[in-house]
Amino acid sequence: QVQLVESGGGLVQAGGSLRLSCAASGRTFSTYNMGWFRRAPGKEREFVSRISSNNRSTLYADSVKGRFTISRDNAKNTVYLQMNSLKPEDTAVYYCAAGTSILWSYWGQGTQVTVSS
């Protein structure tokens, strides 16, 4: 069982930056791929980014490529999402997830990110 707790959300002006963190419980953090997703008001949840368990590969949605950076620290059981050049359309609840290549098994409760124009 893995429990995930996100933090770092808040209100920021367009063009600003935020760094989200997701702390995981359990000893198996390093065996999971970690991902970030978001759900904007009135929209479906969408993929943002993911990082492999061995920290060797990352993937980004086209909408955030070049602005967001995912990273992880397996010693701290934490995954991060550095978000730069934020836009109002980035406003959403951001969720982290842990899983394998075929299934995201565990989800956090989410952290709100609001970008004002």
Image (cartoon, rainbow, N blue to C red):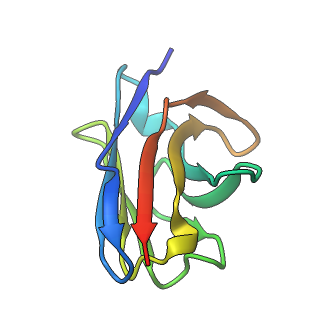
Picture residue at 37% right of the left edge, 19% below the top: 26
Q: Is residue 51 visible?
A: no
Number of numbered discs visible in the structure rendering: 0
Picture residue at 41% right of the left edge, 38% below the top: 30
Residue nearer the viewer, 85 or 91: 91
Left/right placement of residue 40 relative to residue 83 reads right
Residue nearer the viewer, 97 or 32: 97
Left/right placement of residue 8 relative to residue 5 reads left
Picture residue at 52% right of the left edge, 43% below the top: 95
Residue 44 coordinates in the image, percent (x, y): 77, 50
Residue 53 coordinates in the image, percent (x, y): 49, 47
Residue 8 coordinates in the image, percent (x, y): 29, 49
Above or below, 82 against 2 in this view is below
Residue 22 coordinates in the image, percent (x, y): 36, 41
Q: Can residue 106 be seen in this view?
A: yes
Residue nearer the viewer, 19 or 52: 19
Left/right placement of residue 5 relative to residue 42 reads left
Left/right placement of residue 56 relative to residue 61 reads left
Above or below, 110 against 41 in this view is above
Extreme residue toward the left, this view: 76
